[in-house]
Amino acid sequence: MALREPYAVEMVVRGYLAGHAVVNTKQAKEKFVALLFLEGLKENDQLPTPIITPTTKAKVGHDEDISREDILARVS
C-alpha cells in the first residue's frame, strides 16, 4: 500500500458572523454565508447555530477556502 502525503485542512468553528466570513460574504464566495444573510443577519451578529468553515493550510502565502466536496475529492 502506497503512503499518501498529508492533505492539511483547518476547520474554523464560527459562532458569529465576523472576520473572514464577512469578507467572503461581501465577495459572494461562500454559499453558507449568503444563506445567513437571507435570514437578516449582519456583521458581528451571533449565528443561530455555529458553522464550520474549512480552509486549506498553505505552507506559503494565505490559506484558501475549500468546500467539503473539494476536500473529499482530493483525498479519495
Image (tube, helix red, strand yellow):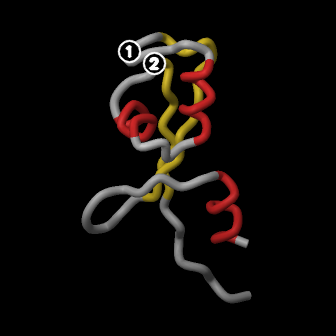
Looking at the rendered structure, the number of numbered marks drawn on it comes to 2
Q: Position of residue 4 (x, y in %)?
A: 60, 80
Q: Position of residue 70 (x, y in %)?
A: 64, 62
Q: Position of residue 45 (x, y in %)?
A: 44, 11
- Taking the spot 54% from the left edge, 43% from the top edge, the residue there is 30
Mark identifier at residue 8: none
- Taking the spot 62% from the left edge, 83% from the top edge, the residue there is 3
Q: Secondary structure at mark 1?
A: loop
Q: Position of residue 2 (x, y in %)?
A: 67, 88
Q: Which residue is mark 1?
A: 44
Mark identifier at residue 16: 2
- Between 41 and 19, the residue placed more toward the observer is 41
> Are the residues tagged 2 and 1 within 8 Å (C-beta)?
yes
Q: Quadrant of the N terminus?
A: bottom right
Rounded to the nearest angstrom, the CA distance separating label 2 from label 1 is: 6 Å
Task: Look at the picture and state if 52 lies above or below 73.
Answer: above
Amino acid type of disc 1? Answer: Asn
Q: Secondary structure at mark 2?
A: strand
Residue neighbourhood size for the residue with mark 2, other residues' Cα within 10 Å, grouped as few (<14), some (14–19), many (≥20): some
- Between 1 and 29, the residue placed more toward the observer is 29
Amino acid type of disc 2? Answer: Tyr
Asked where in the image residue 66 lies, by quadrant, the reply is bottom right
- Between 71 and 21, the residue placed more toward the observer is 21
Task: Look at the picture and state if 8 lies above or below 23.
Answer: below
Is 47 displayed left or right of 26 in the figure? right
- Taking the spot 54% from the left edge, 32% from the top edge, the residue there is 33
